[in-house]
Image (cartoon, rainbow, N blue to C red):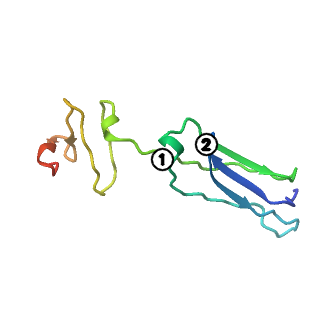
């Protein structure tokens, strides 16, 4: 098993903006040394112009023995309820949310599948 002698880095960015860069320490050459390192990045950011066409993830190191991979990658993108297409949406949380509809659309509460309730958004409280 080869060891990594130089630090590596993982960079997250867009076409024109570096969002974050995380350094990973090298792995020492020893029988009982750590055999891998884990990096977790959890952040919010505001893209230039409120638009992203492409996210870029990169791993780099000057050491030829260094390697990296993504075991789990999760990305959340906020979306306005005014831009939703017709369909069924499930929000599995108890937090209060703000929703609104386009003309001619309705919002239903389906906690009891056999007794759906239409929300009346005209009075401001959604009941």
Badge number at residue 14: 2
The residue that mark 1 highlights is 76
In this view, the residue farthest toward the left is 123
> What kind of element bears circle 1?
loop
Q: Nearer the viewer, mark 2 or mark 1?
A: 2
* Sequence order check, earlier mark of 2 and 1: 2
* Residue 108 occupies quadrant: top left
Residue 97 appears at what percent x and percent y? 29, 52
Report how many numbered discs are placed on residues in the image: 2
Q: Is 5 situated above or below 118? A: below
> What kind of element bears circle 2?
loop
The structure residue drawn at horizontal position 72% and vertical position 60%, both measured from the top left corner, is 23
Question: How many other residues sit within 10 Å of disc 2, few (<14), some (14-19) or many (≥20)?
Answer: some
Residue 84 appears at what percent x and percent y? 33, 34
Q: CA distance from mark 2 to mark 1?
A: 15 Å
In this view, the residue farthest toward the front is 49
In this view, the residue farthest toward the bottom is 32
Q: Is 99 situated above or below 38? A: above
Quadrant in which the N terminus is drawn? bottom right
The structure residue drawn at horizontal position 33% and vertical position 54%, both measured from the top left corner, is 93
Question: How many other residues sit within 10 Å of disc 1, few (<14), some (14-19) or many (≥20)?
Answer: few
Q: Answer whether labels 2 and 1 touch (C-beta < 8 Å).
A: no
The structure residue drawn at horizontal position 48% and vertical position 47%, both measured from the top left corner, is 76
Q: Is 43 situated above or below 14? A: below
Residue in the foreground of this view, choosing between 109 and 102: 102
Residue 20 appears at what percent x and percent y? 63, 54
The answer to whether residue 67 shows anywhere in this view is no
Position of 7 with respect to 121 (left or right) is: right
Position of 102 with respect to 18 (left or right) is: left
């Amino acid at each position: 098993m080869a060891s990594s002698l130089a630090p590596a880095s993982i960079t997250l960015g867009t076409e024109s903006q570096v969002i974050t860069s995380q350094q990973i320490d090298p792995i020492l050459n020893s029988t009982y040394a750590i055999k891998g390192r884990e990096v977790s990045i959890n952040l919010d950011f505001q893209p230039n112009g409120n638009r992203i066409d492409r996210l870029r993830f990169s791993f780099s190191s000057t050491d030829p023995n260094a390697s990296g991979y993504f075991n789990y990658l999760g990305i959340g993108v906020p979306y306005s309820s005014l831009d939703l297409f017709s369909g069924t949406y499930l929000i599995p949380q108890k937090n209060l949310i703000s929703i609104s509809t386009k003309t001619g659309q309705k919002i239903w509460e389906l906690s009891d599948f056999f007794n759906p309730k239409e929300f009346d958004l005209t009075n401001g409280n959604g009941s």
